[in-house]
Amino acid sequence: MKDFVNFAASQRICDKPIVLNYDGHDSHETVEMQRIAFDNGIILFAFPSKTTHKTQPLDVSVFSAVQDAWSYRCDKRVAEGITMDRYNVIHEYLQVRHVVTPELIKTAFRKTGIYPLNPD
């Protein structure tokens, strides 16, 4: 949690609270985590445990889009004779991260029924 707080604080672009969405597994919901979040102005949003395959927007849409773009990029680079290794993996990944857009994230929340709320 402390690593997340430091990273999130370094990326903050306004004074609005940071929202952390996470799996509500018992091991993730500790008093220490809640204290650190509260002390640093972070809003914790826990998805119910054992429901993430249906309720986590990242799993529903975002990760598959990233995986598709990453697979395409790796296949392309290998076909060009470029070896994917520890020296270029971050650079190559940065070339595909653009697939994560505000519209994709909105679509993911819509698909899960989280927002707008779909009680069914």
Image (tube, helix red, strand yellow):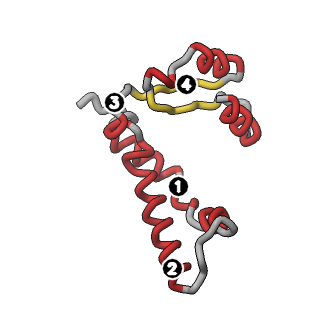
Q: Amino acid at mark 3?
A: Lys
Label 1 sits on a secondary structure element that is loop
Q: Comparing marks 1 and 2, which lies closer to the viewer?
A: 2
Comparing 15 with 68, the one in front is 68
> As shown in the figure, which amino acid type bears the numbered disc 2?
Lys
Considering only vertical position in the picture, is 98 above or below 9?
below
The reply to whether callout 4 and callout 2 are in contact (CB within 8 Å) is no
> Label 1 vs label 4: CA separation?
22 Å
Around disc 1, counting alpha carbons within 10 Å, would you say few (fewer than 14), some (14 to 19), or many (20 or more)? some
Mark toward the viewer: 3 or 4: 3
Image quarter of the C terminus: top left
Taking the spot 46% from the left edge, 72% from the top edge, the residue there is 72
Task: Residue type at mark 1: give it.
Answer: Val
In the image, is 95 to the left or to the right of 118? right
Label 2 environment density (alpha carbons within 10 Å; few <14, some 14–19, many ≥20): few
- Spot occupied by residue 25 in the image (x, y as percentages of width and height): 43, 25
Q: Are marks 1 and 2 in contact (CB under 8 Å)?
A: no
Q: Nearer the viewer, mark 3 or mark 1?
A: 3
What amino acid is at disc 4? Leu
Residue drawn at x 40%, y 35% is 115
Q: Residues within 10 Å of mark 4 (few under 14, many from 20)?
A: some
Residue 100: image tag: 1
* Residue at left offset 33%, top offset 44%: 111
Q: Which residue is mark 4?
A: 44
Q: Which residue is mark 2?
A: 76
